[in-house]
Amino acid sequence: MTPPDQPSTWLDVPADHPFGIHTLPYGVFSTGADPARRVGVRIGDLVLDAGAVAAIGRDAGLVGDGPDLATAWLTPSLNAFLALGRPAWTVARQWLTEVLTDEVHRDGVSPHLHPLADVVLHLPVEVADYVDFYASEHHASNVGKIFRPDNAALPPNWKHLPIGYHGRSGTVVVSGTDVVRPTGQRKAPSDPAPVFGPSTRLDIEAELGYVVGGSTGLGSRVSVDEAGDHLFGVVILNDWSARDIQAWEYVPLGPFLGKSFATSVSAWVTPLDALSEARTALPGQTDPQILPYLQGDAFGLDIHLEVTLNGTVVSRPEHAAMYWSPAQMLAHLTVNGASIRNGDLFASGTISGPTRESRGSLLELTWNATEPLTLDDGTTRGFLEDGDTVTMTAWAPGPDGARIGVAEVTGTIIPAR
Ligand SMILES: O=C(O)/C=C/C(=O)CC(=O)CC(=O)O
Ligand SMILES: [Ca+2]
Ligand SMILES: [Mg+2]
């Protein structure tokens, strides 16, 4: 057998494939022959029916004291697996690595591999609670300058706590889902009264979403150092935003209908265990000093995103530049004793860097449509038009120069109803 730190799969997967043996993301799929939704693991351009393989050992009585992965995986979402918690996630990843690297498993596993092109991918998680943070200093400063030009770019609390708002979990959709242009109220400062109609300032926000498991009870907290026990993995998240609806409705309670109509996520969740090489220091939280409950092993993640609009690359945001880390966000989310549920999802907030090329929203890239973008087909954009397709991809450094993929999230705008 290959040494566990240098596994190589018996499958024919190129070494530079972003979904090679070091990634092993989890999703939910079905096939024409078997429409039951169940958990799959991506390897290269194949999908492993993980529960079907785990059931072979379970039904032969070979599971012993280990977690019953087959039962958790033969369900229509990742939630049952998320409920098993960190020790089971570790066992599962070791088991998957074993069955995909040791030749002895080839005959048993091969019948349960499906070409990616032949499966239907579904929302991987039944999203419990959804929170969106605001953790990029560059994004928060840019939006502050655009929306609140008479105030300081950052609000006074920004460097003391990771600001967030509760979003709408029921409208989180899987990559590939069309997005209907939202309708609502808007009122520009010069308008005498609000008007009603389809949004004319439809935007994107390039974010990472963090998927949570290992539920806790009311009154308990998750510290920064304990956060890794609950952070299962990451997706790319597009927080579609109607800037005109948002600008009129958000004072004083924050984003509401301008962001609740659709939030798109990757079909595959890349486990945190695949991102150990991507752990990095935070860019700096010394001025001001942060309170003790936000201190600890608050690792950043070096993940590189790319945003395309109708095939033209419009931005390359860098997650390593985020001021607040996911562990700090989870600590803050629970510091008041709020419980967490299996399937909770929280997002980084828009990932923007210091340069124009690394801004994660059109609002910033076009400075509220005053500096339109020119696409490769010669057309220009301030905000999104009907028929536009936005695709976000991401990767992180892995062992031995491998790339760890975070699966794409894509969506196309269709006209308002
Ligand atoms: O600054 C504001 O008023 C609004 C900010 C946002 O729209 C961003 C939001 O959803 C949080 C984020 O993505 O960073
Ligand atoms: Ca957002
Ligand atoms: Mg949203």
Image (spheres, grey):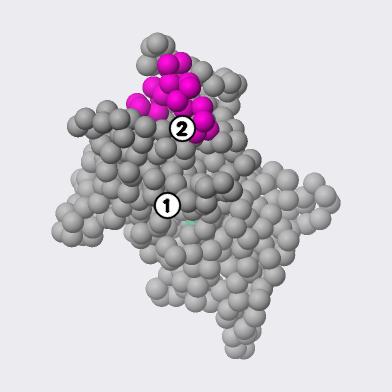
Residue type at mark 1: give it: Pro
At label 2, counting other C-alpha atoms closer than 10 Å, the crowd grade (few under 14, some 14-19, many 20 or more) is: many
The spot of residue 290 in percent (x, y) is 27, 47
Pointer 2 or 1: first along the chain = 2
Side of 407 where 346 appears, left or right: left
Q: Is residue 48 visible?
A: yes
Residue type at numbered disc 2 = Leu
Residue tagged 1: 76
Residue at image point 60% right, 88% down: 193
- Give the magenta part as a residue range: 94-113
Q: Is mark 1 within 8 Å of ligand 3?
A: no
Q: Position of residue 222 (x, y in %)?
A: 22, 48
Which type of secondary structure does the marked residue at label 2 adopt?
Answer: loop
45 part of magenta stretch:
no
Question: Which quarter shows the C terminus?
Answer: bottom right
- Please tell me how many numbered marks the rendered image carries: 2
- Which dot, 2 or 1, sits closer to the camera? 1
**Residue 366 point in image, percent of width and height:** 67, 56
Residue at screen point 53% across, 36% down: 47
Asked if residue 281 lies left or right of residue 248, the reply is left
Q: Which mark is on residue 24?
A: 2
Residue 106, magenta (yes or no): yes
Marks 2 & 1, CB-CB < 8 Å contact: no
Looking at the image, which is closer to me, 366 or 221? Answer: 221
Left or right of 158, for residue 152: right
